[in-house]
Amino acid sequence: MAVNYKNCFMCIDLSKFYASAECAARGLDPNKTDLVVADESRGKGAICLAVSPSIHKKGVENRCRLYEIPDNLDYIIAKPRMRMYMNISAHIYGIYKKFVAAEDVYPYSIDEIFLNAGPYLSLYKMTPKEFANAIMDKIMEETGITATAGIGTNMFLAKVALDITAKHVPDHIGVLDEDTFIATVQKHRPITDIWGIGGGTARRLERFGVYDLEGITRIPEATMYRTFGKNAEILIDHAYGREPCTLSDVQNYQSKTRSLSNSQVLFKDYSLSGARLILKEMVDSLTNELVGQAMYTDHISLYIRYSNDVIAPTGGSKKLEQHTNSYKDISEMMLWIYDKTTTKGYSIRQIGISYGDLVYEHCEQLSFFKDDIKAQKEQQLLHAVSVLKDRFGKNSVLRGMSLQEDATAMIRNTLVGGHCGG
């Protein structure tokens, strides 16, 4: 790719991040150490969140289960330490900001970022590859973690260069512009390797005999829009390697709605009644978070997945009469959805809940048909309980006069201070 000082984007990934972080913490080389990150206390069925590059070369994949690892391999099992990974990620984010301004770096995930590198190439008098190497070397020097990079003339090409091209070159830096993309990636299969194309989209494209991006270019645009709606524009652009969205567009995007969610894959199969109890705990926890942020919801959703996927998932959503963060109102409606939609006689393995259409407290007006003072006190009590749970543990039960007195004092102080619900 020719040096382009105006349009040069990078996508940098921390290779096998969790496993590499565990190796680095032990003073080990992840390229020579067989290590997997998993919670061994959950048994042989525990999922490996990450595997080191060394064991990956021996055929062990991320997201495998412990029992799937060949018995002849001698490897380290590291229990996940999410706080450590987040701290390392934050440190590496600081390294990026030594090279570019904050507005030119966008964290895509805990181990992957986008950079707008164009404005800095002339400043540092470097080619795109030299600039990427300088950043990757600094990450290795300060953390012991190997990075991989994709370079492109737009964000999409940078991501594709990372995902597809970088894996097959010795320096682990993939480079694409629109011409090289058409020549090398447009016919790549499977199409699901391409960023943004999932299994559902791939199956719909198969109906037209399309299995790669080049095939999309042969479908009439009217057919694409009829099949995919507004998403057709993205698919068509990406088929040619085009992407009009810039890093500043991403940085400045604001969603029209906000939501909170919680999903748990259960450690074992649960009965209808057992899963119902876990659901109540999840509603309690998420409602505490809602109250702590002084927000209200008027739309709740439930997702239930059954053991071994023997039947299709169930659940549903419900629009509430008004915005609320009342545990009583939300819990009653969520349990109503659960009792109404959950299939009896099957074990449950995953529960997901979400609260949508969130608004802040100052935006909400209480119903004329409710006692405003009562509602206000309820929110104050919920907030007090939320803070106490944070102090004594989310799963602790508020027992004893001392805790009751703490709650009463907190409410009294809140009333004196003029706050309501956080």
Image (cartoon, rainbow, N blue to C red):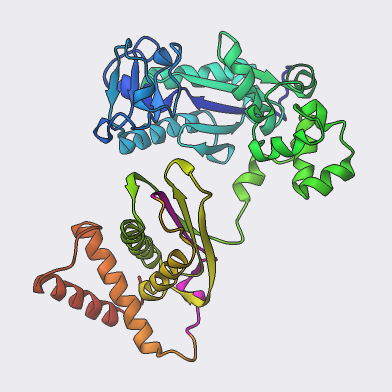
Residue extending furthest toward the front:
345
Q: Is residue 183 visible?
A: yes
Q: Is residue 170 left or right of residue 416?
A: right
Question: Where is residue 390 drawn, in percent x and y?
Answer: 25, 59
Residue closest to the eye, 207 or 230: 207
Residue closest to the eye, 57 or 181: 57
Q: Residue at the location (32% across, 57% down)?
A: 278
Question: Where is residue 341 drawn, in percent x and y?
Answer: 49, 63
Q: Is residue 156 left or right of residue 277?
A: right
Q: Is residue 96 left or right of residue 230?
A: left
Residue extending furthest toward the left:
401
Q: Is residue 28 left or right of residue 63?
A: left
Q: Quadrant of the N terminus?
A: top right
Question: Where is residue 336 drawn, in percent x and y?
Answer: 44, 70
Q: Which residues are magenta?
A: 347-366
Residue closest to the eye, 117 or 163: 163
Q: Residue at the location (35% across, 61% down)?
A: 276
Q: Is residue 9 visible?
A: no
**Height in image: 51 above or below 265?**
above
